[in-house]
């Protein structure tokens, strides 16, 4: 029977410390949450600016329900395009300095649908080895030849571009902020290579939207490259505190996706509540740059203090701090010890990250206080000593 086969497979995962459990978070997504009946500091959420429970987002959702109801009825092409979708898309295009934008049900849908509709058999995709799973799945679905370059290794990317001169269509795709290491792609160098080799460029700004750039548009804005990057993708689900994905770029790009991206065409449109929430979140990102600064201050403080304690951080340059432990069992033991001290920051292990690079992924929020950050450092000091991870 299927359930017996699955039970054997699950037991094998458990033996390798790879079994995953869902943890129930009681109440709201805030900087402190209740898990397993205990109040803990939430240091694992992508709700970076603390907007998931912001009064203006909640108000926008309530008003959207009153005016537009709950469901969107169908796919955008059938009967699902509503006023709020158009409003949100013009706000995104404005924020991203692009001609147009298109929203998808999730960021995952956006990556899978975009890559697989633009690239096809006989084309080539150059993809960073640490790109998000949704990019990898989009590449697989496209049936294009996918060449994976070593993480942020421009020499390797240049070499691969040289090796595929025979292809007519070439796409370079990268995360701008890498989700498990927190480092940043050298978009300026990538864009120079793209120009030299007449390749197209796609950037996934999931962790950068609302966080980086003078207006919170992301790393492309920080590098002043918005007009060079053909496809700018991101999510409404992280710093923007809601749900949904987007692609911003030319009018032709958006029209193509409306016609051909299967995850757009064959999936029901974002509901009014979620759409209205994203508009409210973009307003806050535009009006309150101080939130981005608070987030940066919290991340800088943790990075500095944890390094001083003797922990090894990956090359983290963002609000995502990867504290590399190595062995999965030690990582999970540290996560458990931190939890017992009131810190929720789960261990990340293979297959999400490469073997022997298991880590604690720590993501502070703008809404954490200086006291929260100091407490976090003291908990890491104590847990590290207790487990013999620090000398
Ligand atoms: C989270 C994430 C996605 C997917 O976005 P969802 O809205 O959660 O589906 C895509 N790319 C990256 C880099 C991400 O971190």
Image: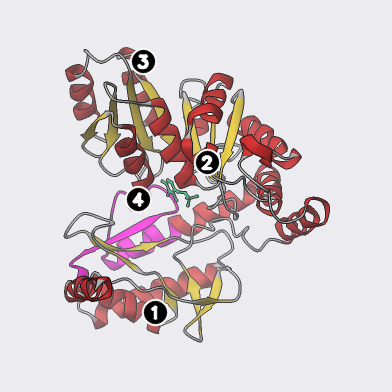
| On screen, residue 346 above or below 157 | below
The residue at label 4 has a CB less than 8 Å from ligand 1: no
The stretch drawn in magenta includes residue 376: no
* Residue bearing mark 2: 266
> Marks 2 and 3, how far apart in space?
34 Å
Q: Nearer the viewer, mark 1 or mark 2?
A: 2
The dot on residue 195 is 3
Counting residues from the start of the chain, the first of labels 3 and 1 encountered is 3
Density class for disc 1 (Cα within 10 Å; few <14, some 14-19, many ≥20) is many
The stretch drawn in magenta includes residue 318: yes
Secondary structure under the numbered disc 1 in the rendered image: helix
| On screen, residue 352 above or below 260 | below
* Residue 44 in sight in this render: yes
| On screen, residue 316 above or below 113 | below
Q: To which quarter of the image does residue 163 belong?
A: top left
* Residue bearing mark 1: 339
Q: Nearer the viewer, mark 2 or mark 3?
A: 2
- Where residue 282 appears, x then y in whole percent? 66, 44
> Marks 4 and 3, how far apart in space?
28 Å
């Amino acid at each position: 029977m299927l359930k017996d086969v699955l039970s054997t497979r699950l037991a094998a995962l458990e033996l390798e410390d790879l079994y995953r459990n869902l943890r129930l978070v009681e109440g709201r997504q805030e900087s402190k949450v209740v898990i397993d009946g205990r109040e803990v500091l939430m240091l694992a959420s992508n709700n970076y600016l603390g907007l998931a429970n912001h009064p203006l987002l909640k108000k926008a959702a309530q008003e959207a329900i009153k005016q537009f109801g709950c469901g969107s009825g169908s796919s955008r092409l059938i009967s699902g395009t509503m006023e709020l979708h158009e409003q949100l898309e013009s706000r995104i295009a404005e924020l991203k300095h692009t001609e147009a934008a298109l929203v998808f049900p999730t960021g995952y849908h956006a990556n899978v649908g975009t890559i697989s509709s633009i690239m096809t058999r006989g084309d080539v995709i150059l993809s960073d080895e640490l790109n998000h799973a949704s990019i990898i799945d989009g590449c697989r679905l496209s049936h294009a030849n996918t060449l994976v370059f070593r993480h942020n290794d421009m020499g390797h990317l240049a070499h691969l571009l040289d090796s595929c001169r025979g292809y007519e269509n070439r796409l370079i795709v990268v995360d701008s902020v890498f989700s498990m290491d927190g480092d940043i792609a050298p978009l300026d160098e990538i864009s120079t290579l793209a120009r030299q080799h007449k390749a197209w460029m796609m950037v996934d700004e999931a962790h950068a939207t609302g966080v980086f750039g003078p207006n919170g548009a992301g790393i492309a804005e920080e590098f002043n490259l918005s007009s060079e990057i053909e496809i700018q993708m991101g999510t409404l689900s992280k710093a923007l505190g809601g749900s949904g994905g987007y692609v911003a770029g030319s009018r032709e790009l958006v029209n193509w996706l409306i016609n051909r991206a299967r995850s757009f065409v064959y999936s029901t449109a974002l509901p009014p509540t979620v759409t209205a929430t994203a508009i409210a979140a973009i307003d806050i990102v535009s009006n309150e740059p101080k939130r981005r600064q608070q987030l940066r201050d919290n991340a800088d403080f943790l990075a500095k203090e944890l390094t001083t304690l003797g922990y090894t951080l990956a090359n983290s340059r963002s609000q995502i701090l990867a504290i590399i432990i190595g062995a999965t069992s030690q990582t999970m033991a540290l996560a458990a010890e931190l939890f017992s001290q009131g810190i929720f920051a789960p261990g990340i292990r293979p297959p999400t990250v490469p073997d022997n690079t298991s880590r604690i992924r720590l993501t502070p929020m703008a809404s954490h206080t200086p006291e929260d950050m100091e407490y976090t450092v003291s908990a890491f000091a104590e847990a590290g000593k207790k487990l013999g991870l620090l000398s």
